[in-house]
Amino acid sequence: MLKNSFELDDKTLHLLSTNGIGANALSQRLKNDLDYYLELWHSQGLNIVKHFSNYYFSTKFTKIEDETFCIVDIETNGSKIEKHQIIEIAALKIKNGQIIGSFDSFVKCDEINEHITQITGISIEDTKDAPSLKKVLYDFKLFLGDAVFVAHDVKFDYKFISQSLQKIGLPPLLNRSLCSISLAERTIESYRYALSYLNKLLDLHPEATHHRAMSDVMTTYELFKISLSRLGSEIKTTEELISFVKKAERLKRPKFDPFLFVEE
């Protein structure tokens, strides 16, 4: 996603998150004005900074407690971006474990099939007076800013929102991101990592309504805090956290589901 938008190779992306890349080398890869791209990328949620003579993702230097994370969840009327859309979106901005902002909206929709309504509880009636997709996405993009995008199964939410932005004529998301499933797999021992299962295991959000955007965001928020509290002291910056989520060994899962155990 990032590579296709910038035409940067994997090596360059790796350097931006690790050892940095010089201005000349970065300009050569871009084949265009560097300052222009730095501004463009920042407007799309990616902050690249100069440190001494090299450029880096800003997350390379930001301590986890100083980072702004945005926990996001969407509900859609189907999984295919070509013919489906977001029907509800919610988000919480988090800094040092505290909520500093919230976003929650239905999205006007002309079609929600019965199966989706059964799963989410959302009907056409709920969305008939909601703002348009364009309005909601404009507002959400302003809310998100350059925060780190966090979601439970981040690939789906991030990609669907990014492609939805492109459908309404805006550029795609470029925010740094991390998956709360992958983080939980490395910090919490569990038989399964579905959000509803972890909620039951850890009593994250007792009043949760699964498959409703803000409820799932609140549950993910509680999960995220627990995961961060279990990180090793060597993980200090946001970029180290992102690397940990991608590369660290997953915890060994229990062989049996504790909720299926029946005491004799």
Image: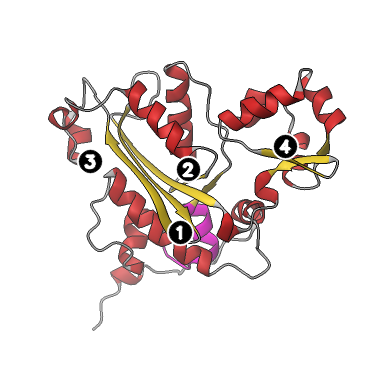
Residue beneath disc 3: 120
Q: Which label sits on residue 224?
A: 1
- Decide which of tag 2 and tag 3 comes sooner along the chain: 3
Residue drawn at 37 percent across, 61 percent down: 198
Instruction: Tell me the quarter of the picture where residue 157 sits.
Output: top left
- Give how far apart the Cα atoms at labels 2 and 3 are: 19 Å
Give the amino acid at mark 1.
Answer: Phe
Question: Nearer the viewer's eye, disc 1 or disc 3?
Answer: 1
Asked if residue 182 lies in the magenta stretch, the reply is yes
Q: Do labels 1 and 3 touch, CB within 8 Å?
A: no
Residue drawn at 41 percent across, 44 percent down: 72
Give the amino acid at mark 4.
Answer: Leu
**Residue 62 x %, y %:** 65, 53
- Quarter of the image with the N terminus in it: top right
Element under disc 4: helix
Asked if residue 253 lies in the magenta stretch, the reply is no
- Give how far apart the Cα atoms at labels 3 and 4 are: 37 Å
Give the amino acid at mark 3.
Answer: Thr
Residue beneath disc 2: 154
Q: Do labels 2 and 3 touch, CB within 8 Å?
A: no
- Mark 1 crowdedness (10 Å alpha carbons): few <14, some 14-19, many ≥20: many
- Residue 138 to residue 119: above or below: above
- Decide which of tag 3 and tag 4 comes sooner along the chain: 4
- Mark 4 crowdedness (10 Å alpha carbons): few <14, some 14-19, many ≥20: some
> Which residue is at the front of the view, 62 or 238?
62
- Give how far apart the Cα atoms at labels 2 and 1 are: 13 Å
Left or right of 170? Residue 13 is right
Residue beneath disc 4: 13
